[in-house]
Image: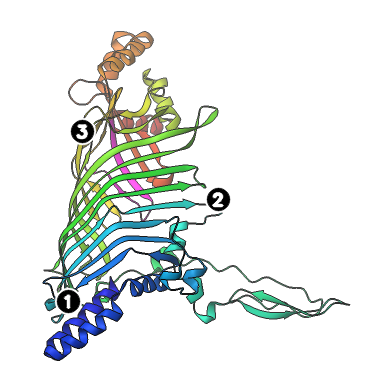
Amino acid sequence: MKKLKWIVLGLSVLLLVGGVGGGLALKSWLGTVLTRESLIRQLETQWNCRADATSLTVSLWSSPARVEITNLNLAPRDAEADAETPLAARKPLTSALAGADHVVLEVDLADLVHRRLHVKRLTLTSVRARNEISEDGGNLLAKLFSKPLSLAPASAAPKVVAAAPVSGEKATSVPTEPGAATPPAGNAPFTPPEPQQPLPKKHRPVFQASALGMSVVIDEARLEQASYHENNRIAHSRTDVSDLNLAISQVDVDPGDLERHNQCKIDLSAHLQTSGRTRIGADTQNVKTSDFTFETHSNIHPIDATTGELSPSGTLDLLLKKGSVFGGFTTIGELAGNDKGLANAKKNFGIDVSNIKAGGDLQEDMRTAVKINGPRIEFTQDARLLFPEYAGIVRAGSWLNGGEDLHEMQLQLVPSDALSKSLQDGVKEKFGDGGMKIALGIFNDGQGRLAFDLISSGRLSKAKVELGGQAGALQNLFKGFLK
């Protein structure tokens, strides 16, 4: 996209200053620059891939200008890409990691003269990608979209140093990585260099709006019927995304005036399935962890107006369709692990929820709204997920921050009528009717129905779950007396 921006900018300037003669020169230049061959060469220069496309059509004289690509495919880099073999002499691609059946880009060239990139339409149809993460951490797509090794800077090439000869043998050359220590001569001990530490997240480069170099307006950008499949051999999991449709519209970003020009609208829908190996009781099994359809609609400010950094903020409405599956293969007790909150509820109040299935099929649509501020997401209204045995509610005000691996979620579990009766019968059996009334006074939803408040907090990757509401307050009070 960046390359195309400067091409069309150059075209518009030539048209403006060259008149008819410039137009004729431009037409000749266009035939040599914007071609199928130049597109493939540009992609293979930018990424570590072998690229192919059936056709590239450019219509500069139309308004807006139009670029159309058919059957674009990206595969792992091979010798033909390294050698820049002419397309006519290449073997056909047999397998691609990413691609699209149809790409259409329409740009208003006149606006480029005023340093304004105005995309009228960008549509990518039947986009597909597949990825595999190997046991040693290798990532096929990450490698595909990295800089080609054959085009890496000379400073990154391995150095060759002479290794000290062993008695009776010739000296040999040993390649070393950039920055590696040179092996010592003779029998001197060799101390390996300290491994380089990865750059901390907070010091990693962040996209700045000023890098755009001009204001950007996008009337409509779409991904239609996209799919993504990933096999993660480290996590022993599989992710399949299908029927993904993304629409980005009303984009208006001006790096010089972010207070007034810093917005976009995003609509997204997809079907997602995940599966993996997990421990259930004493066994490790392959299970389907989720299978759901969702829709989101959001209004976003993509840039932080104060810092100029890419840091989306705004509001998002979320819909999870009825029939979506979340979990259902394990129990609440197994999820709580060694946390004593559920055990204390059974011991102190006679209420045992540890054997209730965690999740299952949604019995109705779930709708909620959240506020986004960079990596932080906060629920602005309750989210109610109705499962077969209970309703799980995420209360408004709950938040999570993926960037800092932190969260605080106010949760409530409301048993179904059948489950509620079973739990109440257990309390009556242990404490009688009086005990049941006390339990209902502590565990209720404010309307006389049995309900359990929970708080999940701390690290997202290792959440701490404990009792909330009146039960949590009483439990903390008892702890105070016992100290």
Q: Distance between the residues labelled 3 and 1?
A: 43 Å
Nearer-the-camera pick, 106 or 30: 30
Answer whether residue 4 is visible to the viewer in this image.
yes
For badge 2, the amino acid type reads Glu
- What amino acid type should be assigned to the residue bearing mark 1? Gly
Could you tell me which residue is drawn at 49 percent across and 35 percent down? 278
Q: How would you rate the neighbour count of disc 2 (Cα within 10 Å): few for under 14, some for 14-19, many for 20 or more?
A: few
Colour theme: rainbow
Question: Residue 256 — which label?
Answer: 1
Identify the disc placed on residue 351.
none
| First along the sequence among labels 2 and 1 | 2
x and y percent of residue 438 in the render?
28, 17
**Relative to 256, is 99 on the left or the right?**
right
Q: Which amino acid does label 3 sit on?
A: Asp
Separation of marks 3 and 2 at Cα, in angstroms? 38 Å
In the picture provided, is 165 more to the left or to the right than 443? right
Q: In which quarter of the image is the C terminus?
A: top left
Give the residue number, with chain letter if any, for mark 3: 365
Q: In the image shown, does 370 or 217 lie closer to the viewer?
A: 217
On the image, which quarter does residue 98 sit in? bottom left
Q: Is 134 placed left or right of 192 in the picture?
A: left
The location of residue 27, given as percent across then percent down, is 21, 82
Label 2 SS? loop
251 in the magenta segment:
no
Asked whether the beta carbons under mark 2 and mark 1 sit within 8 Å of each other, the answer is: no
Which residue is under mark 2? 135
x then y, percent, for residue 251: 16, 63
